């Protein structure tokens, strides 16, 4: 009889001390006991998943917490941290202070970038850190915080994330296009201004990547097509410096010198117009040469526009005219070698030598510049 009672007590105790677990289509997360609160947050749907993790003290005040974000679409981890955390675009970081410089970090089996900072909430001081890393065709960001006067367990718990997505690193345009194609079959990815990416493909000769962008709320019949496409072109040049480095698909297209074609479609799927961006124009963006259509010599000749519907004031096929080359293109340059040391990251190296991060990336095409390692040697371009 005592044996039966003992077994029942142990079973009840095991039930109440069982681990807390939360799962979604991208990853699963478990804790060693049920003192943790785990919840799925729908804030990132329909293009990702978010999980909130927290543990409270005896009075119900937060001891430590974490938020795990997984977003489909591979972004540069360093730039993602800079944009979301250092620039305080993430709501968690709005009132944070004392940000560190980004540094390399290893979490859940992946190399990433980390930023540490401090935050005060409900009269408690918290030590925080945000870590971003790529998982296949996706970016994971983990924000962790624990009370400054208490030990932290959250970092060890986060290491137990089990990803359900393909974790194979992607390095080529073909790989990114294939992965992005699978994503947009499940759902559309936001691309800005209420538009969304609804298709992506690589041409049979591998020369051109076409992004199909659905533009809601308008129809082909309601817009002046040439004016619409040229507006999109001007907008592209304004956004390109960040987009080409921030989005790893676009970064790979730039690196492999592919043509980039935007196919704009209305809500009904009818073509509005197409915009072609050529590799020479990536160089212009990277050299910080501003777009100035009037310098092309003919205001009616617009570069990079093709397959435009006929209009009374403009022909169907327009001539592609290259933009003026930036004066920087004529500058002589030399290359020096930098050996990566402990504490180095791309931001620090670029600042030290007075060059941009994109220039370092272009000078080291065979190196994953986002995961540099101690002892690695980098080519650093130097203008004279």
Image (spheres, rainbow, N blue to C red):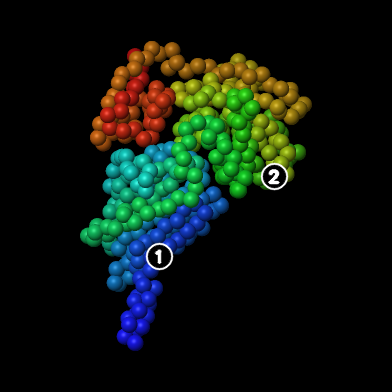
Viewed as shown, does residue 22 lie left or right of 316? left
Q: Residues within 10 Å of mark 2 (few under 14, many from 20)?
A: few
Q: Could you say where residue 54 lies in the image, as x and y percent from the top left?
A: 36, 62
Nearer the observer, 356 or 164: 164
Q: Quadrant of the C terminus?
A: top left
Residue topped by disc 1: 20
**Secondary structure state at the residue bearing disc 1:** loop
Q: Residue at x 31, y 40 (%)?
A: 103
The part of the image, by quadrant, that contains residue 381 is: top left
Relative vertical location of residue 288 with respect to residue 166 in this rendering, above or below: above
**Secondary structure state at the residue bearing disc 2:** loop
Q: Is residue 131 visible?
A: no
Q: Residue at x 46, y 25 (%)?
A: 286
Whichever of labels 2 and 1 marks the residue nearer the N terminus, that label is 1
Nearer the observer, 215 or 102: 102
Q: Residue at x 46, y 43 (%)?
A: 167
Viewed as shown, does residue 177 lie left or right of 57? right
Nearer the observer, 379 or 262: 379
Q: Could you say where residue 11 lies in the image, as x and y percent from the top left?
A: 37, 76
């Amino acid at each position: 009889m005592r044996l039966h009672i003992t077994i029942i007590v142990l079973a009840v105790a095991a039930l109440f001390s069982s681990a807390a677990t939360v799962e979604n289509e991208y990853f699963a997360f478990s804790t060693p006991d049920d003192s943790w609160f785990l919840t799925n947050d729908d804030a990132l749907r329909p293009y990702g998943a978010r999980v909130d993790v927290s543990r409270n003290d005896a009075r119900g005040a937060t001891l430590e917490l974490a938020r795990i974000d997984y977003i489909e679409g591979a972004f540069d981890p360093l730039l993602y941290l800079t944009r979301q955390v250092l620039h305080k675009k993430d709501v968690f970081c709005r009132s944070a202070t004392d940000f560190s410089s980004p540094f390399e970090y290893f979490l859940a089996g992946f190399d990433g970038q980390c930023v540490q900072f401090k935050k005060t909430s409900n009269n408690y001081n918290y030590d925080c850190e945000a870590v971003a890393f790529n998982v296949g065709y996706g970016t994971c960001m983990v924000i962790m915080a624990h009370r400054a006067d208490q030990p932290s367990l959250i970092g060890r718990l986060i290491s137990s994330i089990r990803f359900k997505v393909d974790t194979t690193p992607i390095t080529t345009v073909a790989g990114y296009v294939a992965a992005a194609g699978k994503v947009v079959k499940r759902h559309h990815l936001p691309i800005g201004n209420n538009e969304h990416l609804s298709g992506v493909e690589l041409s049979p000769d591998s020369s051109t990547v076409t992004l199909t962008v659905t533009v809601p709320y308008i129809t082909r019949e309601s817009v002046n097509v040439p004016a619409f496409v040229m507006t999109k072109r001007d907008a592209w040049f304004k956004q390109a410096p960040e987009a080409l480095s921030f989005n790893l698909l676009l970064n790979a297209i730039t690196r492999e010198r592919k043509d980039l074609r935007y196919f704009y479609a209305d809500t009904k799927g009818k073509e509005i117009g197409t915009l072609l961006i050529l590799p020479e124009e990536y160089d212009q963006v990277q050299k910080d040469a501003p777009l100035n259509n009037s310098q092309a010599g003919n205001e009616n000749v617009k570069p990079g526009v093709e397959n435009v519907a006929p209009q009374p004031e403009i022909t169907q096929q327009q001539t592609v005219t290259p933009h003026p080359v930036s004066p920087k293109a004529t500058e002589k340059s030399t290359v020096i070698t930098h050996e990566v040391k402990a504490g180095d990251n791309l931001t620090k190296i670029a600042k030290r030598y007075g060059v941009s991060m994109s220039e370092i990336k272009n000078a080291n095409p065979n190196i994953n510049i986002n995961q540099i390692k101690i002892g690695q040697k980098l080519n650093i371009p130097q203008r004279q």
